[in-house]
Amino acid sequence: MRYKELKITFRTAPTEERCDIAVAELAEIGFDSFSSEGDTLSAYISFAEYDAHAEEIEAFRSDIGGEARTELCDMEDIDWNSAWEADFTPITVSDDCVVRAPFHPAPGVEYDLVIMPKMSFGTGHHATTCLMLRHLLEIDASGLDVLDMGSGTGVLAILAAKRGARHVDAVDIDEWAAENAGENVADNGVADVVDVALGDASSIGGRRYDLILANINRNILLADMPAYVASLATGGRLVVSGFLGIDCDALADRASSLGLKEVKRTDSDGWYSILFEKI
């Protein structure tokens, strides 16, 4: 898959919060990977996503022009697997849960999640993924029907299956992510529980879930929350993440208007997750 790189070099050293806001804005546009070095933030987007969002990208560059210099260029073909192997380190989510790649030694924990991420979001390195994993570790998933919406690598679906879920649907709009999730589900031995599908919130109509996990972004969560609630059983739980603190109240208000009750709000490195229950 061919990618474009957007380099954003801030004129003064950016705060961590400023970089997080830029990442969130770019993720909403379609950028799916990020790296930073010094005052420069680099964001990566596939050619297909760039073609679909060129106007939004140019608007972002115009808006940020007062505080940063931007440069957009085509990337050379890269062996992403090798690049991930070089950078990917195991993540200890809790004493009994670790996310690692196949080339790392087995840690001997109850929930050993083996993920080859390729270019999909959801390795556990980002704060939002860790927040979602920790929520799952606190929820008794035994016998539940679960939806992992925007599943990325499938790491949340895999943990839900290992936590005893009866069935898990892992859905992502990106074909590359869905393919990667299918591979990871098989490698973790939960293919009999987890079904991976390509699609968006419209693809879940008519299905019923006890637990819905959605680690996406503010705008998509606000737009798709009615579809989640329609598919959520009474007493079921919705866990969302992928947003900053400034977005929490908007999401909580939207959830309340749809008959959800906020149960728990957690944060890590400026990112938040909220657990709701359907009344």
Image: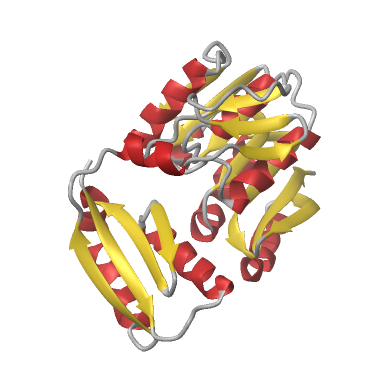
Question: Left or right: where does residue 90 sit relative to residue 116?
Answer: right
Q: Is residue 208 visible?
A: no
From what the image shows, is residue 212 above or below residue 191?
Answer: below
Q: Residue at x 58, y 29 (%)?
A: 157
Quadrant of the rendered structure where residue 165 is? top right
Image colouring = secondary structure
Report whether residue 94 is seen.
yes
In the rendered structure, the answer to whether residue 64 lies left or right of residue 208 reads: left
* Percent coordinates x, y for residue 132 in the rendering: 66, 43
Residue at horizontal 38 percent and vertical 36 percent from the top: 118
Q: Is residue 27 above or below residue 57?
A: above
Find the residue positioned furthest to the top.
192
Residue lying furthest bottom: 66
Q: Give the quarter of the image for residue 177.
A: top left
Name the residue nearer the viewer: 186 or 211.
186
Q: Quadrant of the N terminus?
A: top left
Q: How many marks?
A: 0
Q: Position of residue 114 (x, y in %)?
A: 55, 26
Q: Is residue 257 above or below residue 165?
A: below
Place of residue 12 in the rendered image (x, y in percent of width and height, measured from the top left): 45, 86
- Taking the spot 42% from the left edge, 27% from the top edge, the residue there is 197
Choose between 91 and 231: the one closer to the eye.
91
Q: Toward which corner of the image does residue 61 lie, by quadrant?
A: bottom left
Q: Quadrant of the C terminus?
A: top right
Pinpoint residue 206: horizontal percent, then vertical percent. 54, 29
| Rendered position, 10 above or below 204 | below
The residue depicted at 47 percent of the width and 24 percent of the height is 184
